[in-house]
């Protein structure tokens, strides 16, 4: 088990390195001059050149990469002489568009996205798995067909439609909730929940539909395994057969999907954040793209991809925890 | 008091499918006595497994219809509350399967799976159950049982896994053990060990065994009585000696003739031509008639139009065949099947 985790961990470090190189190159592959973007329309070539030197963009690529990485770990200093600017670690760059360190912007946006993703995750896992098992146990009956039909609808509806409908009916028409206005749960828990409940639901509907189908097909597959017949031959009650024997065996693909989906959302749930005006990572990333805010684009990409890589290793470790054949070979 | 542990009468299992109804088991009757072994022989799709699963109440499919009678332990099992049958499973009647690797749960240790088998039926502490599991594992010949209990099925050899399955089946000392091809997935040497183990345990516990197999060598080794199944029907039922000495119907002859013989010069086996019938559209006549080499010996094409009844030859020997008893013994002599007195 331990060497397995070490191996995975080394792989993760390597993947993070490759990831950083790729994001850095993307930054430089954009067909604009980053220095040009540092000042507005009334820019003189002199200011552009000065900024270029100040940001270190005149240096060769490997040096720039090294400076960037150095910034993440120990911080970096832009410019020289009197006009220096200190960017503390983890420094992900400086956004001229917002006049702020990217790290600060991400620190503000990340919790919003994390709350959004985790809340939706809990909802969809509970409902998806429960209805998946329920449908599998009643395969072919009207309950199963009903659930499958509903999930097909849920799965086909675009998330912005679900979000807008909820917004329209629950808030605009029925006035059951105030208009979404994000505050930290530490500041005002009630307003936080009032703001987050609809985003959670609209995000969870889509995923719950998918997890219902996934759980159902997994259960149907494992229920036909020989060891399920053995469990029944032992005289186990059907509930125990389903929960202890079948579900455990069908869990692996569900865990994989759950890890990847959660990680994907942690990188930003763009549409949901937009619909409910949540100042999260996805919104930050899209605004950055719209504004050609290159340091922010790079940083949000790096953060999102890091979540995926971490989720990968977590899923691998969970795999081993679930399946002794992985753990012991 | 009666020694009969399991008595099956006119058991039929039918599956409704989109292509029509499948008669997987058609009117099968048999008895198994305490400490005795009944072998059910037949090829794939002959209904041998389905009939046993029906006895165990393990046919879960909602489109299955089970009719007939299954008397076990003074109870009629067909038509009663499935919960009652569940309580008997693992306690009074147990089952082992063909492939022990897929029949054991890959994610739980041997110990966990065996302890569970005890605790389903009996309120005992974990440590007491573990103690009983250890004794049982010792009994089925697993060395360093205590250590093995913490291992997972994939860490054991095939023979050991089947020993674990046997231990799990017998841990509550059931009256009936159904063994569904218990040695098919094992090496030949391991097969012999497993069969010997089953025989020993049967002697010790007095378990009645229903042994499902397609291996006539295993039948000769283990069985007291034999039921040959074909196309969902019992085509011949007899004590084991009589089946090998005076088999009564062409399908059984075919099975016996297709065993490799050590004492003949012929290197060619004598297979049964054709394939088993589809259970959806069974022939109107004898189910074996389309593949039977002797159907023309019966006048009026009776074999293809009328299904033969199970008729007795001696008190314990019955077969489904239109051939007369004299014809049968002539053919046996000419094909050199069975024992010629």
Image (cartoon, coloured by chain):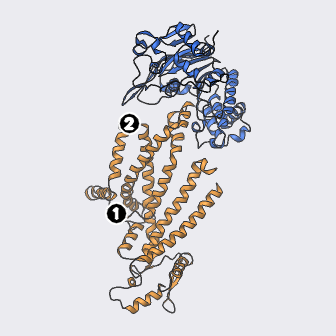
Chain colours: A orange, B blue
Q: Which residue is located at x 37 percent, y 70 percent?
A: A286
User: Regarding mark 2 in the picture, which secondary structure is present there?
Assistant: loop
Q: Which residue is mark 1?
A: A276
| Front-lying residue, A268 or A66 | A66
Label 1 sits on a secondary structure element that is loop
Q: Which residue is mark 2?
A: A140
**Chain to which the residue tagged by mark 1 belongs:** A
Mark 2 or 1 closer to N-term? 2
Query: Which numbered marker is on residue B81?
Result: none
Question: Residue at the left extreme?
Answer: A173
* Side (left or right) of B275 relative to B40: left
At 47% from the left and 85% from the top, the residue drawn is A55
Residue B62 visible in rendering: yes
Residues packed near mark 1 inside 10 Å, few (<14), some (14 to 19) or many (20 plus): many
Q: Residues within 10 Å of mark 2 (few under 14, many from 20)?
A: few
* Residue A170 x, y percent position in the rendering: 30, 55
The mark lying in front, picked from 2 and 1, is: 2
- In percent of width and height, residue A158 lies at 32, 56
Spatial separation of the CA atoms under disc 2 and disc 1: 38 Å
A140 sits to left or right of B142: left
Tell me if I can see residue B72 in this picture. Answer: no
């Amino acid at each position: 088990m331990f060497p397995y985790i070490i191996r995975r961990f080394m792989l993760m470090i390597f993947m993070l390195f490759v990831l950083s190189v790729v994001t850095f190159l993307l930054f430089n592959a954009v067909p604009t001059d980053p220095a040009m973007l540092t000042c507005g329309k009334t820019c003189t070539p002199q200011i552009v050149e000065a900024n270029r030197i100040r940001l270190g963009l005149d240096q060769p690529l490997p040096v720039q990469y090294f400076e960037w990485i150095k910034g993440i770990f120990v911080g970096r200093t832009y410019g020289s002489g009197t006009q220096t600017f200190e960017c503390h670690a983890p420094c992900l760059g400086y956004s001229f568009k917002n006049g702020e360190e990217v790290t600060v912007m991400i620190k503000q946006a990340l919790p919003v996205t994390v709350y959004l993703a985790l809340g939706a995750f809990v909802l969809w896992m509970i409902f998806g798995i429960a209805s998946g098992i329920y449908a599998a146990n009643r395969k072919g009956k009207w309950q199963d067909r009903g659930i499958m039909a509903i999930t097909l609808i849920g799965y086909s509806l675009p998330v912005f439609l679900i979000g807008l409908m909820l917004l329209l009916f629950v808030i605009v028409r029925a006035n059951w909730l105030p208009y979404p206005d994000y505050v930290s749960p530490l500041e005002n828990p009630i307003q936080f929940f009032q703001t987050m409940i609809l985003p959670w639901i609209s995000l969870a509907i889509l995923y719950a539909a998918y997890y219902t189908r996934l759980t159902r097909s997994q259960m149907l597959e494992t229920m036909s395994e020989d060891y399920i017949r053995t469990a029944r031959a032992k005289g186990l009650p059907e509930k125990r057969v389903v929960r202890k024997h079948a579900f455990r065996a069908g869990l692996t693909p569900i865990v994989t999907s759950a890890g990847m989906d959660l990680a994907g959302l942690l990188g930003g749930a763009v549409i949901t954040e937009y619909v409910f005006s949540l100042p999260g990572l996805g919104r930050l990333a899209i605004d950055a793209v719209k504004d050609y805010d290159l340091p922010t684009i790079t940083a949000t990409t790096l953060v999102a991809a890091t979540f995926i890589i971490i989720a990968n290793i977590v899923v691998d470790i969970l795999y081993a925890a679930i399946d002794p054949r992985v753990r012991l070979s | 008091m009666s020694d009969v542990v399991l008595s099956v009468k006119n058991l039929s299992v039918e599956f409704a499918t989109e292509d029509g109804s499948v008669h997987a088991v058609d009117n099968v009757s048999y008895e198994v006595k305490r400490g005795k072994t009944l072998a059910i022989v037949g090829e794939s799709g002959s209904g041998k497994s389905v009939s046993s699963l029906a006895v165990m109440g393990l046919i879960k499919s909602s489109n299955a219809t089970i009719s007939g009678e299954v008397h076990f332990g003074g109870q009629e099992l067909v038509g009663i509350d499935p919960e009652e049958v569940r309580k008997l499973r693992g306690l009074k009647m147990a089952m082992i399967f063909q492939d022990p690797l897929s029949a054991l749960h890959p994610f739980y240790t041997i110990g966990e799976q065996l302890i569970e088998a005890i605790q389903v039926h009996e309120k005992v502490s974990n440590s007491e159950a573990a103690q009983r599991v250890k004794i049982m594992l010792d009994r089925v010949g697993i060395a360093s049982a205590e250590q093995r209990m913490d291992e997972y099925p994939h860490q054991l050899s095939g023979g050991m896994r089947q020993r674990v399955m046997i231990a799990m089946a017998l841990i509550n000392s059931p009256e009936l053990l159904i063994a569904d091809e218990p040695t098919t997935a094992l090496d030949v040497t391991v097969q012999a060990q497993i069969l010997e183990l089953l025989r020993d345990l049967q002697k010790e516990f007095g378990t009645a065994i229903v042994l499902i197999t397609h291996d006539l060598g295993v039948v000769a080794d283990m069985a007291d009585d034999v039921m040959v199944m074909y196309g969902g029907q019992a085509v011949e039922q007899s004590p084991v000696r009589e089946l090998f000495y005076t088999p009564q119907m062409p399908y059984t002859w075919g099975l016996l003739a297709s065993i490799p013989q050590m004492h003949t010069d012929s290197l060619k086996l004598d297979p049964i031509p054709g394939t088993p019938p589809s259970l959806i559209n069974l022939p109107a006549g004898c189910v074996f008639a389309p593949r039977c080499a002797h159907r023309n010996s019966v006048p009026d094409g009776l074999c293809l139009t009328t299904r033969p009844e199970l008729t007795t030859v001696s008190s314990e020997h019955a077969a489904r065949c239109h051939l007369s008893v004299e014809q049968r013994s002539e053919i046996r002599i000419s094909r050199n099947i069975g024992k010629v007195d």
